[in-house]
C-alpha cells in the first residue's frame, strides 16, 4: 500500500479523488492501492525545556543558555492532533511507500519530516509530490513525476535549522528579559525575527515624534504659464532666496536649451506573495495575514497557483501553458485581452527566468477560472488576473520636455510630462495607476503655504508650451516657503517592503531582487510575525498604520545589544539558511553559530544589566545596590549584608532614579509628598550610614512680598506664584522644579486654569492647542509625577 500525507484535509480530498481513494475511513481516504491521510499543520513540534530536564521548568538566569545537544520532538498539545497522528503512524507502519504531499516549501517539508521522525518510519521508501497548483492537471502531472524524498534533504535541513534556531534564541532571550525585567505576571517575548521587526517600527515612531520640521525656500518663476525652478535647489535661509529674487526681477528669462525625449515605464512584474500583500494593502486596506488567507483559499479552490512564493518570474516549463491560459481568461477579461496577439506573446527576462525561480514560480491564475467568486476573493483574484495580462502589454510612454533658461545669469529649469501611450496603465483605474507598485518610504515636503505663484504639487506633470531656444520672455519670480515633514508611519505595505530588503529602502528592481535572500523572515512567515506582535500588544493597528505601543517601546529600550534588534543580522541568517537549502553551507556550522551568538548575547546583556542595575553604593558595606523584584538591595546579600531599600516608603514610590539619588547623596535633593500616621506632608528622604531611612519635613519658603499664592506646589508644598513666563514654585532656590508655563502648545494658560490645576490636579478640556505642524487639538492638563502633561482621555 502507498500512503500519501497531505498538509490538510481539503488538499487530501483533492488528491484522493485523483487516485480513486474514495472510501471514507477514520482519518484517511482509502482506495485499492492508495491511502490518503492528512495533517493539521504543525502537529509535531520541538519539546519544551522541562521535557529535557525537569529543573528547567523554573525560569532561572543561572540555567541560561538552554541549548539541547539533540533536539527531541513531541506532539502538539491538543487531542485531535494526537488522535490523527496515531492514525498516520499506523498507516506509515503498514505502508510499502510513503508520499509527502504537504505544501511544496520549507515549512511543508518540515511538517512531513517531523511527523516521519516522530512515527519512527524514516527507513521507509519515501517520494515527494512537488506541485505549484491543485488543479487536476497539476496533480496528475505531479504523480507522474514523483521525486525521491532525498532530493529535498537540504530543504529539510534548512527548515530544521530555522526551527531550532528560533527555539534557542527565542527561549533564552525571552527567559532572560522576563526574569531580569518582567514583573511576576509580565512575559517579555523576544524572537530572532519578531524583535528586529518591532525595533524597526519603534525606531520609525520615535523618529517621527522627535522630528522637528524645518523651513526652507525655493526660487520659482512663472513664464508663459509654466513653472520654472531655480536649479540651486532648497535654501535654508529666506534671505539667500530673496537675493536671487531681487536679482532676476525685471530681467528677461532667456531659453538656453530645450530637450525632448520619450520616457518608458515597464509594466509591473508578476506577483510574489510580498508584492501581492503590499498591493492589496494599498488598494483595499487588507492586512498581510488577510491577503495570505484569501490567496491560500483560492489556491485550495484551484483558482490560483501556490501563493507562498518569493519569485516574480515564471520558469521555462510554464511558458507554453500561458497562451492557452490567456485564451481561457478571455471569457473573464475580453476587452483587456483583445489588444494582445496570444500567438506572439513576448516572454522577456522580466517574465521568464529559470535562475530566479527556486521552489515556486510567481502567483498566476490557473485554468480553473474563478468566475463565481465574490467579495474579497474576487478583488484579489482580479488583481492577479489583471497583472498576468499587464506584463504582456507595451510600456507606458510619456513625452518628457526639459527647458533650461537663464535670468540675470541665474539658472532655471522647467520639466513637463505628457502621456503619449498609456500602454499597460490602460488596465488600471487612474486612482490606482498613479500609486507606485512598491511604497517609496521617503520623506516628502509639505505643500507651500501662502506663497504666490507656487509650483503645482507635481511640477513634473505640467504640460509645457512650445518653448524655442533663444526666446526671451517676461516672468514672475516667487519665493514659496516649504516645511520638511517627518517620515510616514509604517503601514503593512511599507513594512513588508523593508522586511523584504532587511531594513534598506530600495526602489531599483534589480537591487531588490538581489536583497531578497537577505530579507527579514520569509514570504510565508511575515504576515504571522506582524500578527504575533499585535497579539502580544507590542504594536497596534491605527487605521492603516502599524504603531508601537508603550509595551513595545519599553521592550526595545531594555535591549542593550544591538544585534538582537538588527534586521541586517537577521537578514544574513536568512541568507545562510538559503545557502543551507542550496547545499552551500553546513547545517552544523549554522547551528554552532546560533549557539555561540546566543551565549554572546546573554553574556553581553548580563554585563550591561549589571552595570545598569548598579544604583549606587551600599551605605553599610559599599557593594553595589541592585534592583530586585520587590525592593532594592545590596548585591553582597549572600555574604550577609542585609541592607534593603524599599520600593515604597511612607506611601511614596521610589523609582530607580530616586533610589539612585538617595544612595548617591544620602538624601533626596528635593522634598517629596509622604504620608506619616495618616498625615500628609512634604519631606526630604534621608539615609544614614547604618542604612536607616528617616525624613525631614520641608520648611516651605515664604512667598515674596506682594505676591499672591495661587495654591500649594504639588511637588514640595511651597507656594505657586506668578512669574513673567510661568507660574512657578517659591521653593525654586531649594531645587524645586515644578512649573506651569503660561503658554503651552501656542495656547495661553489663564490664571483660573492654573488655579484649577493646582486645586484638583487636572483641568477641564481646553480647546485651541496647536501642534508643531499647526494642527489644532484639545486636551486636559494634568499633574503627573511633578510635571504638567497633556491628558487626552
Image (spheres, helix red, strand yellow):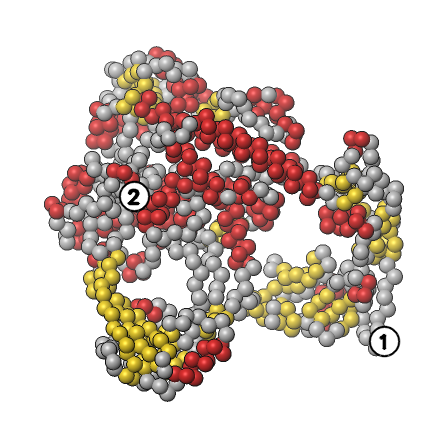
Please name the residue shown 65% across and 38% down the image: 607
The foreground one among 489 and 366 is 489
Please name the residue shown 35% across and 68% down the image: 458
**How many marks overall?**
2
Element class at badge 1: loop
State how far apart marks 2 and 1 are (Cα). Answer: 79 Å
* x, y percent for residue 604: 61, 38
Dot 2, crowdedness within 10 Å: few (<14), some or many (≥20)? Answer: many
Element class at badge 2: loop
In the image, 560: left or right of 30?
Answer: right
Please name the residue shown 87% across and 44% down the image: 689
Name the quadrant containing residue 254. Answer: bottom left
Q: Is residue 300 visible?
A: no
Q: Is residue 186 above or below residue 779?
A: above
Which of the two marks, 2 or 1, is nearer to us in this view? Answer: 2
Q: Which residue is mark 1?
A: 705
Please name the residue shown 46% across and 58% down the image: 488
In the image, 553: left or right of 705?
Answer: left
Q: Is residue 791 visible?
A: yes
* x, y percent for residue 569: 48, 41
Instruction: Name the disc covering residue 785, or none.
Output: none
Screen quadrant of the N terminus: top left
Q: Residue furthest front?
A: 409
* x, y percent for residue 550: 59, 49
In the image, 141: left or right of 756?
Answer: left
The foreground one among 179 and 31 is 179
Q: Which residue is mark 2?
A: 312
* x, y percent for residue 612: 68, 44
Amino acid at each position: 500500500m502507498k500512503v500519501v500525507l497531505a498538509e490538510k484535509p481539503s488538499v487530501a480530498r483533492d488528491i484522493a479523488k485523483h487516485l480513486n481513494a474514495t472510501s471514507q475511513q477514520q482519518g484517511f481516504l482509502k482506495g485499492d492501492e492508495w491511502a490518503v491521510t492528512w495533517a493539521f499543520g504543525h502537529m509535531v513540534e520541538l519539546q519544551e525545556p522541562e521535557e529535557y530536564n525537569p529543573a528547567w521548568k523554573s525560569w532561572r538566569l543561572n540555567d541560561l543558555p538552554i541549548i539541547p545537544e539533540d533536539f527531541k520532538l513531541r506532539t502538539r498539545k491538543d487531542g485531535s492532533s494526537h488522535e490523527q497522528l496515531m492514525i498516520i503512524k499506523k498507516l506509515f507502519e503498514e505502508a510499502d511507500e510513503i508520499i509527502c504531499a504537504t505544501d511544496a516549501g520549507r515549512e511543508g517539508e518540515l511538517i512531513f519530516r517531523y511527523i516521519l521522525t516522530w512515527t519512527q518510519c524514516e527507513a521507509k521508501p519515501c517520494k515527494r509530490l512537488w506541485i505549484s497548483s491543485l488543479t487536476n492537471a497539476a496533480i496528475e502531472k505531479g504523480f507522474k513525476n514523483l521525486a525521491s524524498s532525498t532530493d529535498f534533504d537540504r530543504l529539510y535541513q534548512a527548515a530544521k535549522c530555522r526551527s531550532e534556531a528560533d527555539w534557542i534564541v527565542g527561549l533564552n532571550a525571552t527567559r532572560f528579559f522576563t526574569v531580569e525585567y518582567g514583573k511576576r505576571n509580565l512575559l517579555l517575548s523576544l524572537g530572532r525575527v519578531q524583535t528586529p521587526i518591532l525595533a524597526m517600527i519603534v525606531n520609525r515612531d520615535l523618529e517621527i515624534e522627535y522630528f522637528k520640521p524645518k523651513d526652507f525656500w525655493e526660487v520659482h518663476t512663472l513664464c508663459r504659464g509654466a513653472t520654472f525652478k531655480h536649479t540651486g535647489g532648497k535654501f535654508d535661509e529666506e534671505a539667500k532666496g530673496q537675493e536671487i529674487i531681487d536679482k532676476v526681477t525685471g530681467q528677461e528669462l532667456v531659453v538656453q536649451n530645450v530637450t525632448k525625449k520619450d520616457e518608458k515605464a515597464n509594466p509591473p512584474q508578476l506577483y510574489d506573495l510580498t508584492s501581492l500583500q503590499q498591493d492589496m494593502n494599498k488598494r483595499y486596506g487588507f492586512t498581510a495575514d488577510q491577503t495570505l488567507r484569501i490567496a491560500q483559499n483560492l489556491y485550495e479552490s484551484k483558482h490560483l497557483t501556490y501563493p507562498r512564493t518569493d519569485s516574480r518570474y515564471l520558469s521555462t516549463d510554464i511558458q507554453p501553458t500561458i497562451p492557452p491560459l490567456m485564451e481561457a481568461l478571455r471569457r473573464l477579461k475580453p476587452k483587456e485581452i483583445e489588444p494582445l496577439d496570444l500567438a506572439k506573446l513576448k516572454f522577456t527576462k522580466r517574465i521568464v527566468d529559470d535562475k530566479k525561480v527556486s521552489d515556486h514560480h510567481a502567483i498566476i491564475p490557473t485554468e480553473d477560472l474563478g468566475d463565481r467568486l465574490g467579495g474579497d476573493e474576487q478583488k484579489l483574484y482580479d488583481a492577479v488576473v489583471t497583472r498576468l495580462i499587464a506584463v504582456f502589454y507595451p510600456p507606458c510612454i510619456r513625452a518628457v520636455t526639459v527647458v533650461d533658461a537663464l535670468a540675470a545669469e541665474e539658472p532655471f529649469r522647467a520639466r513637463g510630462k505628457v502621456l503619449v501611450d498609456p500602454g499597460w496603465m490602460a488596465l488600471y483605474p487612474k486612482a490606482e495607476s498613479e500609486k507606485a507598485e512598491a511604497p517609496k518610504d521617503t520623506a516628502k515636503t509639505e505643500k507651500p503655504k501662502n506663497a504666490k505663484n507656487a509650483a503645482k504639487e507635481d511640477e513634473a506633470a505640467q504640460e509645457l508650451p512650445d518653448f524655442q531656444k533663444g526666446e526671451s520672455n517676461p516672468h514672475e519670480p516667487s519665493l514659496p516657503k516649504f516645511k520638511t515633514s517627518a517620515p510616514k508611519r509604517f503601514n503593512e505595505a511599507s513594512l513588508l517592503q523593508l522586511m523584504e530588503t532587511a531594513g534598506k529602502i530600495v526602489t531599483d528592481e534589480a537591487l531588490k531582487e538581489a536583497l531578497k535572500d537577505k530579507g527579514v523572515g520569509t514570504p510565508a512567515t511575515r504576515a504571522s510575525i506582524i500578527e504575533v506582535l499585535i497579539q502580544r500588544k507590542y504594536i497596534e493597528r491605527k487605521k492603516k498604520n502599524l504603531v508601537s505601543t508603550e509595551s513595545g517601546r519599553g521592550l526595545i529600550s531594555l535591549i542593550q545589544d544591538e544585534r538582537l534588534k538588527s534586521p541586517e543580522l537577521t537578514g544574513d541568517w536568512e541568507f545562510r539558511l538559503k545557502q543551507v537549502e542550496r547545499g552551500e553551507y553546513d547545517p552544523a556550522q549554522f547551528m554552532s553559530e546560533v549557539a555561540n551568538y546566543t551565549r554572546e548575547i546573554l553574556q553581553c546583556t548580563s554585563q550591561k544589566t549589571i552595570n545598569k542595575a548598579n544604583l549606587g553604593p551600599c551605605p553599610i558595606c559599599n557593594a553595589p545596590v541592585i534592583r530586585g523584584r520587590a525592593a532594592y538591595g545590596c548585591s553582597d546579600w549572600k555574604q550577609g549584608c542585609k541592607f534593603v531599600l524599599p520600593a515604597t516608603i511612607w506611601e511614596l514610590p521610589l523609582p530607580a532614579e530616586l533610589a539612585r539619588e538617595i544612595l548617591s547623596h544620602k538624601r533626596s535633593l528635593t522634598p517629596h509628598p509622604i504620608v506619616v500616621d495618616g498625615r500628609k506632608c512634604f519631606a526630604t528622604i534621608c539615609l544614614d550610614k547604618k542604612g536607616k531611612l528617616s525624613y525631614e519635613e520641608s520648611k516651605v519658603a515664604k512667598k515674596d512680598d506682594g505676591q499672591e499664592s495661587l495654591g500649594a506646589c504639588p511637588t514640595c508644598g511651597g507656594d505657586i506664584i506668578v512669574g513673567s513666563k510661568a507660574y512657578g514654585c517659591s521653593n525654586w532656590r531649594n531645587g524645586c522644579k515644578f512649573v506651569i508655563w503660561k503658554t503651552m502648545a501656542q495656547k495661553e494658560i489663564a490664571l483660573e486654569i492654573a488655579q484649577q490645576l493646582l486645586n484638583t490636579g487636572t483641568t477641564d478640556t481646553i480647546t485651541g492647542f496647536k501642534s508643531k505642524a499647526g494642527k489644532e487639538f484639545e486636551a486636559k492638563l494634568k499633574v503627573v509625577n511633578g510635571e504638567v502633561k497633556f491628558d487626552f482621555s
